[in-house]
Image: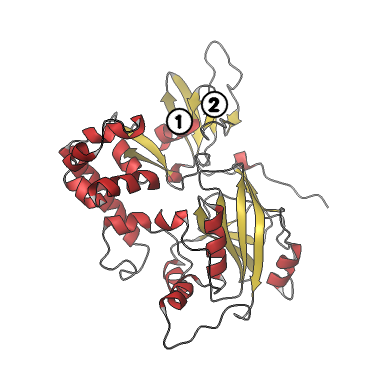
Amino acid sequence: MLRHKMNPIDNFTQTKECVYKEHTYSVRDNGAVFRHAKSKRYKNDNCWSFGTLNHKNGYLYLGSARVHRIVAMAFLGKPPTKEHIIDHIDTNRQNNRPENLRYLTRLENALLNPLTRQKIIYHCGSIEAFLKNPKILREKVSANESQNFQWMRQVSVEEAQNCLKNLEYLFLQREQIKKESFYQNNGIGEWIYKPLYSTDTKFTKSIQDTFYDTQAIFPANAKQRNWRTPSEFPLCPKTKEQNPLEAYAKNMQQDKVFSSNQYGTSVIIKYVLLQDNATQKKLPQNGQNAKDLHIQDFRINENALLVLCRFEPPNIKRYSLAKVTYENDCFIHTALETYFDENAGYKYFTLAQGLEWKGGEVFDDYC
């Protein structure tokens, strides 16, 4: 029997209109745009589109216009100032859903970039020190710095203080979705370095209700958790199984597609089935050393299918870690984290199993 497959472009709940660069657009909350033709009709007029990918910068375009700017204009309104730019919250430049976009100043956006943060900390000692006194950077950055960093030497005290307030506000918003003790006594600098999602089981349970489940596009018994874009899971069993996760694991294979949506696919690198903690390292309850505690922090203590993937086409963060659990007759696909470096994916794939990682520190440990 053939199943009807919904076109992702038609999966939306809200449409708004806006005017951007003298063109009128209809915009859906899934990131699709419709440019209304003027007296002269162009190729991309009067049809819904997610845009065309520019492989050089990773953005989606409709003609010469960046799609994320059109979506932001429709759902977020005009930028507060000329200095504000649009930030993709999940770092995926092809995810133009309104909830993934926000206006930030150039400085705020730079502070969310791991390489820029490292450079500021190198010169100023800490993020807080720079924001309280941007003069430190002006005095220490040499004249032969790259053009991309030169502008930061001119940051005013007022701009830095406003940035500090905005980052504190974002920090407080983030605090609402976790236990108060999770980052106890840690300031903005610590928050910037910590990922939003942790595989730590206690933390996971504390925010499980906050990240509500959404229905996947396919199959009907698949749901998504902490997974912004409705996706298909082609390997997911479509019928009720006696051992659901075992059945799912039998469908898994390296280089097969784990998930897909309008932005691309997640292709399997490695996977493992965790059952009753049988495959996980048994750690001692007493006398744990630092290494054992680190393993325990990231260990998944439940029956789950753990999947390490790569994105195609590549995102800024090219690798992802997800887990699949079976709850209330549904397969729950939970996005755990994304990574810049493949080695980081292997590291946290290993730690999630309760195994020791012997590869040392990775780039994402500092991001």
Location of residue 309 by image quarter: bottom right
Q: Which quadrant of the view contains residue 254?
A: bottom right
- In the rendered structure, the answer to whether residue 197 lies left or right of residue 127 reads right
Is 22 above or below relative to 53? above
> Residue 295 placed where, x, y %?
48, 73
> Closer to the camera, 350 or 172?
350
Single out the residue that lies furthest toward the bottom.
Answer: 286
| Residue 79 place in picture, x, y as percent | 33, 33
Q: Position of residue 232 (x, y in %)?
A: 66, 52
Identify the residue position indicated by label 2 in the image: 62
Q: Is residue 233 above or below residue 63?
A: below
Looking at the picture, how far across and down is residue 329, in whole percent? 65, 70
Q: In the rendered image, is residue 117 in sight? A: yes
Which one is in front, 255 or 83?
A: 255
Q: Residue drawn at (45%, 75%), measured in percent from left and top?
A: 291
Provide the residue designation for mark 1. 70
Label 2 amino acid?
Leu
Q: How many residues crowd mark 1 within 10 Å: few (<14), some (14–19), many (20+)?
A: many
Left or right of 34 on screen, residue 70:
left
